[in-house]
Image (cartoon, rainbow, N blue to C red):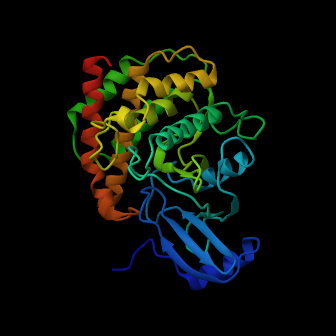
Amino acid sequence: MNDPNALETATLAPYLEAHVHGFRGLRSVEKFSSGQSNPTYLLTAASGRYVLRAKPPGELLKSAHQVDREYRIMKALAGSKVPVPPMQHLSADESPIGRMFYVMTYVEGRIFWDPALPELASNGDRTAIYDAMNSTLAALHDIDVEAVGLADLGKPGSYFERQLARWSSQYRVSQTETIADMDALIAWLERHLPPDDGRVSLVHGDYRLDNMIFAPGRNEVAAVLDWELSTLGHPFADLAYQCMQWRLPNSSSFRGLGGVDRAALGLPAEQAYVEAYCRKRGLADIPDWTYFLAFSFFRLAAICQGVYKRALDGNASNPEKARSYGAAVGLMVRLATEMIAEGR
């Protein structure tokens, strides 16, 4: 059976040479196995290495897979305190591969898939990686969206109310079975919605360790990737989404720090990580923390359900891995439910 994500180099090469400055001599196209939303490819050419990120084939959910949005955001952030790969070209929907894609320069560096950072030898290096990740998040939320031309990226205010409605709807569209605990979680989030406090910033939407490239030999963020879910929103949503990592089991498909002796590895506790973020942004504390975390688990569960549905429909970027996301939905809901019950 033909792979719907495969790219034809014969038609792609002349297009890239015509539209990407300096591009010449496409030698190979290799699909990355990671990533479930938009298929991503390493392009090796005589002129260097590039990354192509495309919409997936097949019927797509409305407002999903906006590679043009990713391209616009990263292009706007070039030169800011939030490092991103250099953007090279955005195609139209009527591209040589039959769907929209963008091309960016390949960024050399390290991606850490396990938040326990077992490949690093020293606790000092692990501490520095987490501090760099924390500093980059604080810098992101301090971006002047007007100055970088992103003031129209989303609607300011009522972020959690709008996101709850959006992801509840997305979940219903991709639902494959009734999960009573998910229904109960959605109802709890609706009942306990905190009042809007007026905070608005650029948010990444999927801010986590494995969406960053760290510089070779240095504990610095070289590039933040995967901006598809970025919008104008509430900065604490990004912080809580990342802090799910402390509560997810280290053995799950979503590697977390649950059960890991963090102090022995030089990794910060969740509270210490949140306090460091607050210091960098001049904040006293984070109210309604349990709600923000519960919302993050719900949202990730809805995203996992969408990936799983695409696998069943035959248009997932990585079908084998995508099918495992069905089980992840239950894990996210259980962790949120337990956290709410324990009030932590």
In the picture, the quarter occupied by the N terminus is bottom left
Task: Please state which of residues 325 and 189 is positioned toward the viewer in this rendering.
Answer: 325
- Answer whether residue 81 is visible to the viewer in this image: yes
Point out residue 186 in the picture as x, y percentages from the top left corner.
33, 28
Q: Is residue 271 left or right of residue 68?
A: left
Residue 246 in percent (x, y) is at 37, 34
Residue sitting at 27 percent across and 54 percent down? 324
Provide residue 28's location: percent of width, then percent of height: 55, 80
Q: Nearer the viewer, residue 171 or 287?
A: 287
Q: Residue furthest right?
A: 147
Nearer to us in this view, 129 or 27:
129
Dividing the picture into quadrants, the one containing residue 232 is: top right
| Image quadrant assignment for residue 58 | bottom left
Name the image quarter holding the C terminus.
top left
Q: Is residue 97 left or right of residue 25?
A: left
Q: Is residue 24 above or below residue 209?
A: below
